[in-house]
Amino acid sequence: MFGNIKPVTKNLLILNVILYLLALFFESQKGIDLADYLGGHYFGTPLFQPYQMVTHFFMHGGFWHIFMNMYVLVVFGSFLESLWGPKRFFYVYVASALGAFLLYSGVGFFQIMELKSTINNPEALAALNGLLKEAGRNITDGDLIQLAQRYGVEPGAQFNAYVQYAVKSVIPMVGASGAIFGLMAAFAILFPNTELQLLFPPIPIKAKYLIGGYFVLELYLSFQDGKGDHVAHLAHVGGAVVGAIIVLIWRKKGQNFY
């Protein structure tokens, strides 16, 4: 099976697995979480770096996260790469991943700006930014309380905004899910009536219903602001939208490639 995977799909698979193993090594041997540096942080936060727009979709949050993403990559990736060719396939993959990040982080940027406005204390915010750059996700509740008291952050709405700003700053977006959703959306538009076999339960469902239903679910969950599940649903939506738009543009130009 591995020998039948198309070259770009195979290289993406290998690169994701290598970086996942490298992240495990750094965390276990060096105590360094690469996701803090290579994961995608919101625009407007002290931990954001431009390179994260690319590196975030090679980081993953655990075994099942990378396993499911790579499984879907192999299933849809090889087929679409054989259909489009390696250059077009790579373009859709990267464009979907970037689109996912831009939508997710763009919406997050406005949330960050609102929190800054609520804090309305430049000295306290500057002190917190400095601590976030130094400690990252190792920042503690005690650190936040101490800073808030030192710089006159008032209890209530102002302090809550202070805490939320810290939380949103340190938790990165990771994973290739945005790119994967772009591929799935493209497939559903090109081959809507193709039946896909589910693993659980083992029943066939047409692509337009399975992938379309999954997209609607992610859209709904994105409005719940990820309550408790720590999943970037909005990024999934962004990736799917970009993948769909590219395919629709190609179709309008008469470029179905099959």
Image (spheres, rainbow, N blue to C red):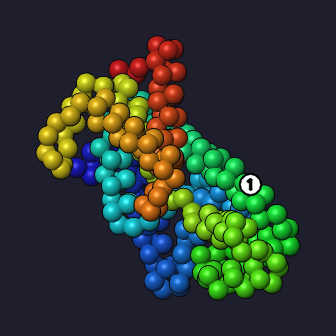
Q: Quadrant of residue 43?
A: bottom right
In the shown orientation, is residue 105 left or right of residue 88? right
Q: Position of residue 133 (x, y in %)?
A: 71, 74
In the picture as drawn, the residue positioned furthest to the left comes out as 202
For the C terminus, which image quadrant? top left
Q: Amino acid at mark 1?
A: Met
Q: Quadrant of residue 153?
A: bottom right
Locate residue 178, reporting x and y percent. Answer: 48, 46
In the image shown, does 10 or 38 lie closer to the viewer? 38
Residue 206: % across, % down: 24, 30
Relative vertical location of residue 54 with respect to residue 155 in this rendering, above or below: above
* Residue assigned mark 1: 113
Q: Residue at x 64, y 66 (%)?
A: 164
Residue 46 percent location from the top left of the image: 73, 66
Q: Is residue 166 visible?
A: no
Outermost residue, right direction?
A: 123
Q: Residue at x 18, y 40 (%)?
A: 197
Q: Is residue 158 above or below residue 252?
A: below
- Based on the displayed image, in which of its 4 quarters is residue 15 positioned? bottom left
Answer left or right for 233 relative to 162. Answer: left
Q: Residue at x 47, y 30 (%)?
A: 244
- Name the residue at the front extreme: 156
Looking at the image, can residue 3 be seen? yes
Question: How many marks can you see?
Answer: 1
> Where 225 falls versus 76 (above or below)?
below
Question: Does 152 sit above or below residue 54?
Answer: below
The residue tagged with tag 1: helix, strand or loop?
helix
Residue at the image position 57 percent from the left and 66 percent from the top = 171
